[in-house]
Amino acid sequence: MANAPGGLLGLEPESNLSRYLQDIRKFPMLAPDEEYMLAKRYQDNADADAAHRLVSSHLRLVAKIAMGYRGYGLPMGEVISEGNVGLMQAVKRFDPDRGFRLATYAMWWIRASIQEYILHSWSLVKMGTTAAQKKLFFNLRKMKGQLQLMEDGDLPFESVTEIATKLGVPEQDVINMNRRLGSPDHSLNAPVRIDGEGEWQDWLVDEGDDQESLLADHEELSQRRDLLARAMETLNQRERHILTERRLSEEPMTLEDLSREYGISRERVRQIEVRAFEKLQKWMTRAVPGGGAGAGNGGAAPAVA
């Protein structure tokens, strides 16, 4: 599972897309029982052949999802390759005992991998980091089309309000993203003057932290992540899942959703969440005297997730 999808399967989406799409149709779909047994073989024994069959049988799903992102001007072969990476991550983490099919689980990993690739490749400038900003990036163009607002320039105020309301983001984020999408990147090596002397990069001043500070921050973040991972190991599976979904996810699950998943009351879910959080705090306090509460703080958790 460590290899790239093309190398794993002998297929290269970048080389000849039409031939690739024909080749992946040769891989048979899996019946539910067969998929379950293959997933268990990989989960229990790290069976490479089982992983290969799980991945190959879902390559058509990747291609179908990838085709939905054709409007961003990126090579479709590369988009599919990134989706294949997401598929492999899904196979690696798939738990067949949860009761749903691999395709249902994998589609989220595939989309996430493709979207991350688009966000990093579409522009040299990072477009968005939060889930809401990513949602805005991938839905703004579609909503502008629905409102027949495809001309360049700022959006009408009423359209900004409508889009912001439907996507659940601030109006200023809509304005900024629309301007960003309408402005191509420019090279920092472009000359400032007609005679060609001087470049735009000559006027830039680095106001960021020096390398020593960045290294120290990186080491601190790594330590915090390691502490959190070790602390999470002290929880049982249900406590770990509930705490992760409630406090460590960008889009937390509701008490109602978790209560339905586990067949218990919302109050019981809340109690388990609080108990798990208190366990983390106590473990952090013992591991890092004086810093336990900060390490387990709900606001800091996403930073170390």
Image: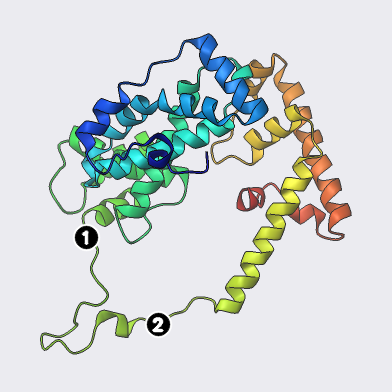
Q: Would residue 100 be seen by someone viewing this image from the given angle?
A: no
Residue at 45% from the left image edge and 14% from the top image edge: 30
Q: Earlier in the sequence, mark 2 or mark 1?
A: 1
Quadrant in the picture for residue 248: top right
Give the residue type at disc 2: Val
Q: In the rendered view, would you say 255 is above or below 129?
A: above
Residue at 40% from the left image edge and 82% from the top image edge: 205
User: Which of the two residues, 21 or 305, is positioned nearer the viewer here?
Assistant: 21
Secondary structure beneath label 1:
loop
State the CA–CA distance, disc 2 to disc 1.
22 Å
Question: Residue 184 shows which numbered tag?
Answer: 1
Query: Count of labels shown?
Result: 2
- Tell me the crowding category of disc 2: few under 14, some 14 to 19, or many 20 or more residues within 10 angstroms, Cα based: few
Residue at 66% from the left image edge and 28% from the top image edge: 45
The location of residue 254, given as percent across then percent down, is 60, 27
- Tell me the crowding category of disc 1: few under 14, some 14 to 19, or many 20 or more residues within 10 angstroms, Cα based: few
The location of residue 49, given as percent across then percent down, is 52, 27
Secondary structure beneath label 2:
loop
User: Which of the two residues, 45 or 198, is positioned nearer the viewer here?
Assistant: 45
Give the residue type at disc 1: Pro
Quadrant in the picture for residue 218: bottom right
Q: Is residue 277 left or right of residue 154?
A: right
Q: In the rendered view, would you say 30 is above or below 248?
A: above
Q: Would residue 41 be seen by someone viewing this image from the given angle?
A: yes
Question: Residue 33 shows which numbered tag?
Answer: none
User: Which of the two residues, 120 or 27, is positioned nearer the viewer here?
Assistant: 27
The location of residue 110, given as percent across then percent down, is 42, 34
Q: Which residue is mark 2?
A: 205
Residue at 72% from the left image edge and 53% from the top image edge: 226
Residues at discs 2 and 1 in contact (Cβ within 8 Å): no
